[in-house]
Amino acid sequence: MAVTNAEKIADALRAGPVFVTKDATMLDWPPTPGGEYGVLRKGSSQWTCLTAIPGHPHDEPGCFDRVFLRLHPLGSEPKQEPDAAIQPPAESLLTAAKRTLEILASGAVVSENHGRSTR
């Protein structure tokens, strides 16, 4: 079981590939249920990694992006406001809808597996 903060950070780093963990915030579990998560290292990316649960039979640290954390906040961490950066702009949805109508108007049939075939 990890004891020092350096060991806890090393444990959390096992949770994902380097491109996820490199700039991620590293958290430690609260000392008591319902307590505050400890910040082992403040990160600069959208990722947050958490050490394995102390004493749990499954040794599984985890990394989570801001979308996951908004839907499933950790403990007492505040729920974040919606982030415009992760919501597609309306224009993109309109463009996708127009393209779908063009495909259907061309006589193409969209199969159940979302592949295209022509009539």
Image (cartoon, helix red, strand yellow):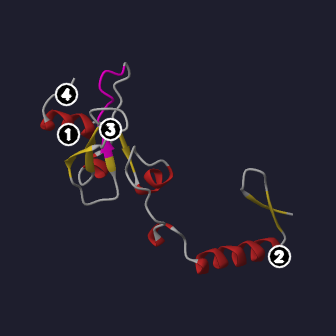
Tell me the residue at 44%/70% (across/down). Answer: 85
Query: In terms of sequence position, does the residue under pointer 3 or pointer 4 come before the other?
Result: 4
**Gap between marks 3 and 4 measured at Cα:** 14 Å
Residue nearest the viewer, comparing 115 with 73: 73
Q: From the image, tell me which residue sits under label 2.
A: 105
Tell me the residue at 43%/61% (across/down). Answer: 80
Residue 33 percent coordinates (x, y)? 36, 33
**Gap between marks 2 and 4 measured at Cα:** 61 Å
Amino acid bearing label 2: Ala
Q: In this view, does 48 lie to the left or right of 87?
A: left
Which quarter of the image is occupied by the N terminus? top left
Q: From the image, tell me which residue sits under label 4.
A: 2
| Residue 35 vertical placement versus 85 (above, below) | above
Q: What stretch is highlighted in magenta?
A: 49-56
Query: In terms of sequence position, does the residue under pointer 3 or pointer 2 come before the other?
Result: 3
Frontmost of labels 3 and 4 is 4
Tag 1's secondary structure? helix
Amino acid bearing label 1: Ile
Majority secondary structure in the magenta region:
loop
| Residue 73 vertical placement versus 51 (above, below) | below
Q: Is residue 85 left or right of residue 54?
A: right
Amino acid bearing label 3: Ala
Q: In which quarter of the image is residue 114?
A: bottom right
Q: From the image, tell me which residue sits under label 3.
A: 15
Within 10 Å of the Cα at label 2, are there few (<14), some (14-19), or many (20+) other Cα atoms? few
Tag 4's secondary structure? loop
The residue sitting at the bottom extreme is 91
Q: From the image, tell me which residue sits under label 1.
A: 9
